[in-house]
Image (cartoon, rainbow, N blue to C red):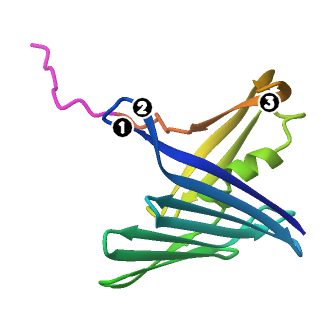
Amino acid sequence: MYKNTYIYNIKVVSDKAAYEKVGEYKVEIVEENGIRTVKSTVVINGTELESNQVLYNSESLLPIKSQVFTKFGDMDINIECHYKKNSIELVAKTPKGIYKKKLKNRDNIYDNLQVYDLVSKLDFTNEQRHKINILNIKTSIVEEYEISYCCLEEVRLGDKVYSCSRLSLSKVIDCTEKRINPFVLDKT
């Protein structure tokens, strides 16, 4: 079993122009029996505002199930996503009811919470670029991203120096759409 937890402070600039801690962002990665779970939690001023979790296959990295819990004031929203071979089923539970949506899954689509763990598993020895499809389950939109290897560099943290790869994660934008000119000039 593998387990690792990362905790980051969330800070804002106060009216005194100083950084003030208002909460924390916690990411926990657990791997057991071929299933990897990534869970993130946002706590602001002692209140848990958001909790995300995704379960996926450790070998293929394909997601199995993900869940997002968000708190807006006194309203709680829970979104579950089930990844199947040919479809993705989303179910949102709100105080106003239950909403369902089904998406086609023709390509390998990954959950947006997997991105940072997924990037660490990509092999850049033969290719300098990888294209991946990522689903944002809050918006139910699948977008294509490109991850490219930039360079190897040394990063100093305190007294230690680490050898790190610099990577770029960019959203792929389709610029092939043609614009129709509303004005037509007639030569006379």
Q: Amino acid at mark 1?
A: Ser
Could you say which quadrant of the image residue 148 lies in? top right
- In magenta stretch: residue 154: no
Q: Is residue 73 left or right of residue 99?
A: left
Left or right: where 113 falls relative to 31: left
Give the structural element (helix, strand or loop) at label 1.
loop
Residue located at (54% from left, 67% from top): 51
* Helix, strand or loop status at disc 3: strand
Q: Give the number of the disc on residue 14.
A: 1
Residue span colored magenta: 179-188
Amino acid type assigned to the residue bearing label 3 in the image: Ser
- For the C terminus, give its image quadrant: top left
Q: Is residue 127 left or right of residue 95?
A: right
Q: Are marks 1 and 2 in contact (CB under 8 Å)?
A: yes
Instruction: Please report contact status of discs 3 and 2: CB closer than 8 Å, yes or no.
Output: no
- The residue singled out by tag 3 in the image is 165
Question: How far apart are the alpha carbons under marks 1 and 2?
Answer: 5 Å
- Residue 34 lies in what quarter of the image? bottom right
- The residue indicated by pointer 2 is 18
Residue 56 shown left or right of residue 137 in the figure:
right
> Mark 1 or 3, which is nearer the eye?
1
